[in-house]
Amino acid sequence: MSEKHMVCTVCPMGCRLTVTCDESGELTVQGNTCKRGERYGRDEYIDPKRTVTTSVYVDGGQMPVVSVRTKTPVSKTSIPQVLEALKGFRAQAPVAVGQVLIANVAGTGADLVATRRIRKVSL
């Protein structure tokens, strides 16, 4: 039997969860006050996911970089591949908030979107 302790981040309650996996592979979540907490505990135990946030260079923009994030969370094991896919990537100005800069980044199924507007520099 294995046990993992975590704090749920789905809502502001911050429930302290204990997820237990028995010999047959059945998961039990304790400490949650809602169903979302139970689902979070199961998902976090089986395949934790995170939203990747970073910045990428912009060519021809009023600023040299733009902040970006994955539109949906990706598996923690995929984060190095996502970051590797961004090496050398350069967005082209103008950039709009929510604009998809890389669709299905690193084969994760998540799009990389801009979180800031960057205007094009006029010469």
Image: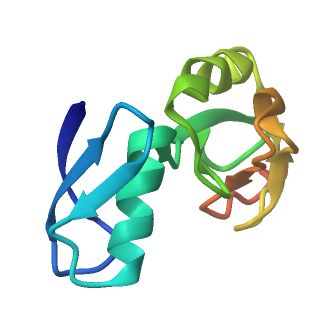
Q: Where is residue 72? Give x, y as percent.
A: 65, 57
Q: Where is residue 18? Give x, y as percent.
A: 17, 53
Q: Where is residue 20? Give x, y as percent.
A: 25, 45
Of residue 6 and residue 25, the one placed in the foreground of this image is 25
Query: Residue at position x 69%, y 57% from top?
Result: 118
Q: Is residue 81 above or below residue 64?
A: above
Of residue 1 and residue 76, the one placed in the foreground of this image is 1
Total labels: the figure holds 0
- Asked whether residue 38 is in view, the answer is yes
Q: Is residue 117 above or below residue 108?
A: below
Task: Tell me the quadrant of the picture where the N terminus can be found.
Answer: top left
- Asked whether residue 64 is in view, the answer is no
Of residue 102 and residue 119, the one placed in the foreground of this image is 102
Q: Where is residue 57? Give x, y as percent.
A: 66, 31
Query: Residue at position x 42%, y 54% from top?
Result: 42
Q: Is residue 55 above or below residue 18?
A: above
Query: Residue at position x 56%, y 27% from top?
Result: 79
The part of the image, by quadrant, that contains residue 84 is top right
Report whether 98 appears left or right of 51: right
Q: Residue furthest bottom?
A: 34
Report the coloring of the rendering: rainbow
Q: Residue furthest front?
A: 24
Query: Residue at position x 73%, y 15% from top?
Result: 88
Report whether 38 appears left or right of 25: left
Q: Is residue 33 above or below residue 40?
A: below
The part of the image, by quadrant, that contains residue 14 is bottom left
